[in-house]
Image: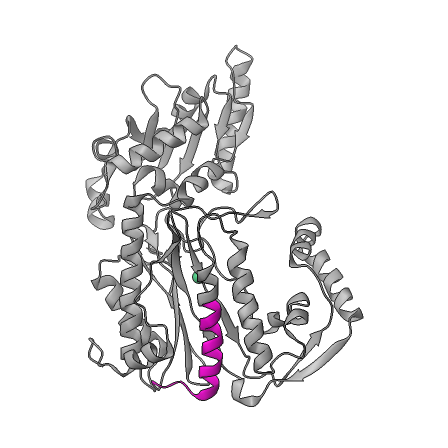
C-alpha cells in the first residue's frame, strides 16, 4: 500500500468523476507489467489516470464506476492475496485491502471481471472506456456483443462507447492544494539534484556518473523514481545539457539546466546563454490567470530572435525572421508543456482552435533553448512567410506525409539565402527550463532556487560536492 494514501482526496475525485458519467458505466484498467528480458520486468509505474482515481499502485487491476448501482458504485478488480506469489513479487492488497484501505464499495479477484461486467452493464446507456488497448478492446467488444444478444431477451445494452479521458484530464489539469504540496516537493528534490550535479561534475567524467550523483539526491530526498529517464548530455564544446527530474507523490517535476563542465562559460557560450535566459524570463513574465497559453511561446520567440539578429546569426531582421520562422533552424521546439502526474501532462492546449486561457492551479514548464549543430558550418534559410497555425491545421487535415510533401514543394519555390554559422557558436546548446504554477494573482516558479543566472551557475559549479568523487 502506498505510504501516503490520502483516502479523502481520492474519494473527492471519484465523486466528481461519478457525477460526470451520470448513469453510465466506466471501466478504467490499470497498467500491466511489461517484460524486459527473460523473466524480468521493467520497473512498474501505475497508469496516471487509474492512479488519479484509485490511489492503487498494483498492476493488472481494473476499476469500475457504476454510479447508478444500488451498492457497488465503485468496484476494484485486483490480484487476490497469494502467499507464495507475494514472497517472490511483493505484497498485494487483495480484495480485502481494496475495500479496507482503498475505499472500494466492493472488490473481486480480477478473473471475475468479465462476469461482473455483464451484470453491471445491463440497462446502462453509455460505456465509458478508452479504446486503444488491443487486448482490453477485444474484451470490451466481446462484452458488448453478449449484451446485445441479451437485449433480444429484454435487457438494455449500452448504445454509446465514450472516452472518459477528457473528463479525467480536465480534473488533472488543475492542482488542488494537497496535489500542489506534492508537486512542490517534486520540484524541490529536483532542484537539489541539479545543484549537486553542478557541484559534482568535472572534466573527464562520464555522463552516467553525473546522472548517478543527481539521482542519489533524488532518492535520498524521498523520490522513489524519476519522472522520466534522465537525459544527461555533454556537447563537444564542454557545454552540458541536462534534463531530468524527480517524481514525488505521483507528481513529476521537469528541470533543464545548462552548465559548463569546466566551471566557467566561454564568451560565445555566455552570449547564447544570456539570450536564452532573457527569453525564458520574458515568457515567465507574461504568465498570469487570463493570459493565453500561446503568449509565453510568443514572448520567448521574440526575445530569441532579437538575440539571434544581434549576433548576426540570422540573415534577416526581427520582423522577417519571425514571419518566416527563420529561428526554427536553431529553436525547433515549443516553449513548454503541461506538467503534472505525467511529465508531458494531459490537457488540451487549444480549445476549438484557440489558445487556452491560463487558470489558477495549472502547472506548466517554460523551456526555451538555442542549439547549434557542431557540424553545420552554414545554414540555408528559405525566405517565405507562413503561419504555423495553418501549417499545423494542414498537417492534421492531410496527414504528416502529404503535408510535408506540400511544405517541401513550397520551400523549393521560395528564394533562399545561405548564411555562415561562426565557428565559435558551433556545438553550443543551451536550454533553461523551470516549472510554473498559475496563482490567483500571477505565477509562482516551483523550481526557484535552481541556479540560473551565469553568476549563480558558475558559483555553484565551484562549490564542493556533497558526494565523494
Ligand atoms: Mn520539459
Disc count in the image?
0
Q: Is residue 121 above or below residue 422?
A: above
Q: Is residue 198 above or below residue 188?
A: below
Which quadrant is the N terminus positioned in? top left
Quadrant of ligand 1 in image: bottom left
Give whichever of 349, 210 is nearer the camera: 349
Rendering quarter of residue 261? bottom left
The stretch in magenta equals 263-280
Q: Residue furthest front?
A: 441
Give whichever of 234, 291 is nearer the camera: 291
Q: Residue furthest right?
A: 413
Secondary structure predominantly adopted by residues drawn in magenta: helix
Q: Is residue 377 above or below residue 141?
A: below
Magenta stretch contains residue 394 = no
Magenta stretch contains residue 269 = yes
Rendering quarter of residue 329? bottom right
Residue drawn at 54 percent across, 72 percent down? 304
Residue drawn at 52 percent across, 10 percent down? 154
Amino acid at each position: 500500500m502506498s505510504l501516503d494514501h490520502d483516502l479523502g482526496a481520492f474519494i473527492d475525485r471519484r465523486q466528481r468523476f461519478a457525477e460526470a458519467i451520470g448513469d453510465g458505466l466506466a471501466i478504467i484498467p490499470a497498467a500491466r507489467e511489461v517484460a524486459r528480458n527473460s523473466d524480468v520486468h521493467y520497473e512498474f509505474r501505475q497508469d496516471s489516470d487509474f492512479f488519479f482515481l484509485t490511489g492503487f499502485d498494483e498492476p493488472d487491476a481494473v476499476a469500475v464506476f457504476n454510479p447508478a448501482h444500488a451498492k457497488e458504485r465503485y468496484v476494484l478488480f485486483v490480484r487476490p492475496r497469494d502467499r507464495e506469489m507475494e514472497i517472490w513479487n511483493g505484497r498485494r492488497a487483495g480484495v480485502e485491502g481494496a475495500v479496507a484501505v482503498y475505499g472500494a464499495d466492493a472488490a473481486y479477484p480480477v478473473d471475475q471481471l468479465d462476469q461482473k461486467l455483464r451484470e453491471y452493464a445491463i440497462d446502462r446507456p453509455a460505456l465509458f472506456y478508452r479504446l486503444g488497448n488491443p487486448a482490453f478492446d477485444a474484451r470490451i467488444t466481446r462484452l458488448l456483443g453478449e449484451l446485445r444478444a441479451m437485449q433480444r431477451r429484454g435487457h438494455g445494452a449500452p448504445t454509446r462507447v465514450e472516452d472518459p479521458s477528457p473528463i479525467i484530464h480536465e480534473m488533472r489539469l488543475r492542482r488542488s492544494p494537497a496535489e500542489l504540496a506534492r508537486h512542490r516537493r517534486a520540484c524541490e528534490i529536483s532542484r537539489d539534484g541539479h545543484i549537486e550535479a553542478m557541484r559534482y561534475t568535472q572534466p573527464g567524467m562520464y555522463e552516467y556518473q553525473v546522472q548517478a550523483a543527481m539521482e542519489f539526491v533524488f532518492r535520498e530526498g524521498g523520490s522513489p523514481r524519476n519522472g522520466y529517464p534522465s537525459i544527461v548530455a555533454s556537447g563537444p564544446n564542454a557545454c552540458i545539457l541536462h534534463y531530468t527530474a524527480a517524481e514525488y507523490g505521483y507528481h513529476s517535476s521537469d528541470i533543464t539546466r545548462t552548465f559548463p563542465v569546466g566551471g566557467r562559460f566561454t564568451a560565445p557560450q555566455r552570449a547564447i546563454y544570456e539570450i536564452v535566459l532573457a527569453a525564458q524570463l520574458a515568457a515567465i513574465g507574461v504568465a498570469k490567470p487570463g493570459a493565453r497559453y500561446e503568449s509565453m511561446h510568443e514572448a520567448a520567440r521574440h526575445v530569441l530572435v532579437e538575440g539571434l539578429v544581434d549576433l548576426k546569426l540570422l540573415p534577416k531582421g526581427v520582423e522577417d525572421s519571425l514571419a518566416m520562422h527563420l529561428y526554427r533552424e536553431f529553436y525547433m521546439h515549443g516553449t513548454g508543456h503541461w506538467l503534472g502526474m505525467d511529465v508531458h501532462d494531459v490537457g488540451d492546449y487549444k480549445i476549438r482552435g484557440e489558445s487556452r486561457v491560463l487558470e489558477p492551479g495549472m502547472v506548466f514548464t517554460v523551456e526555451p533553448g538555442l542549439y547549434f549543430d557542431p557540424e553545420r558550418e552554414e545554414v540555408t534559410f528559405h525566405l517565405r512567410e507562413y503561419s504555423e497555425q495553418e501549417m499545423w491545421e494542414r498537417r492534421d487535415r492531410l496527414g504528416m506525409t502529404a503535408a510535408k510533401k506540400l511544405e517541401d514543394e513550397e520551400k523549393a519555390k521560395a528564394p533562399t539565402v545561405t548564411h555562415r554559422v561562426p565557428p565559435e557558436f558551433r556545438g553550443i546548446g543551451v536550454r533553461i527550463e523551470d516549472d510554473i504554477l498559475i496563482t490567483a494573482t500571477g505565477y509562482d516558479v516551483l523550481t526557484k532556487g535552481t541556479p540560473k543566472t551565469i553568476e549563480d551557475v558558475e558559483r555553484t559549479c565551484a562549490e564542493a560536492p556533497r558526494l565523494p568523487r
